Image (tube, grey):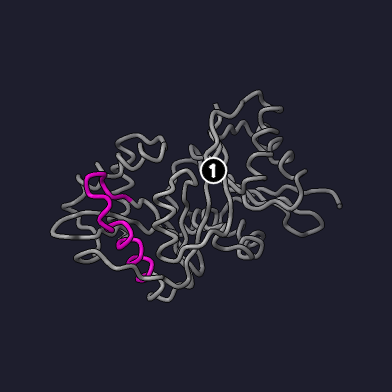
Amino acid sequence: MGELRLTHHSTAQAFLARAQDWLMAAEPEHNLILGICERLINRPDGYQGKPYLVTVEDGGSVVAAVAMTPPYKLVLARVLQVEALGLLAEDLIEAHLYPPGVLGPKTEAQVFARLWRAMTGIGTVSIEAEAISEVRQVVHPAYSGSHLRPARFDELDVLTRWRISFMVEVGLQEEIEARRSATQDLLERGGLYVWDDAGLVSVAATNRSTPHGVCIGFIYTPPPLRKHGYGTSCVAALSQQILDSGREFCCLFTRLADATSNDIYQKVGYRRVADWVDVFFE
């Protein structure tokens, strides 16, 4: 092992010039970092703060890559050398950047959290076990009634209320106005879809794109409408639509504690490809 070299990248293009080959070796697993870069390139005003885009190399080979768009968490890719995590922590402290948490592969994120506490005194409030799953061929269920369609602008209010309920249910903090803004953004870029059975019954969104895939999220059915197969139908139909458009795969994040949702995704062909954790700092 040689001397590790940490490099800051001022643009997503510069970051990808060094990290893309490394990230693409596990494209579905790295969908979040790749999606952040895609958004920075195509919608540079999509984030409030200056992005933190860093690679760590050993002898010209990438051994770690991270992205952060304040005020959001630090996102880790796979790390080949654990020493790189200490170097990253030192760099964040020197830059006076204190992320609210870290999201990444299970081992890497947990090691970083321990280093962060030792170096800053900032501990972990909670750790949410997650998985990244992908589908390349949909297993079609017995679809519930009606059809998938794009959401309409006159449905913004109800879909915002659903997003608020969704965020509370999954334990994510977000200002109510930010939830409305995020829902409106999805509508404006055509990324929000609903299952319609004589009215809205379920929703799913295309959250971000990678070179060969699309990550879906905001998958939600209101409690009174559950157990009718609406969520399963919505996920299966949207996944098939994405694959039919020429993408090689769809992927999504799941909370391991949510057995019902995991069962739905498995039924339509999603298979787990990586274990991640979402770590919240105090």
Using residue 117 as the reference point, say whether residue 213 is left or right of it. left
Residue type of the residue flagged with mark 1: Ala
Q: What's the residue at 32%, 54% (across, down)?
A: 186
Q: Residue at x 33, y 46 (%)?
A: 182
Please say whether residue 234 is one of the residues in the magenta stretch.
yes
The residue that label 1 is drawn on is: 129
Q: Position of residue 228 (x, y in %)?
A: 25, 56
| Residue 200 screen position, x and y as percent | 19, 54
Quarter placement of the C terminus: top right
Counting from the top left corner in percent of width and height, residue 210 is at: 50, 63
Mark 1 surroundings: few (<14), some (14-19) or many (≥20) residues within 10 A: some
For the record, the magenta segment spans 220-241
Closest to the observer: 99 or 140? 140
Residue at the right extreme, as displayed: 1
In the picture shown, does residue 162 fall above or below 127? below
Can you tell which quarter of the image residue 235 is in? bottom left
Is residue 119 found inside the magenta-colored segment of the image? no
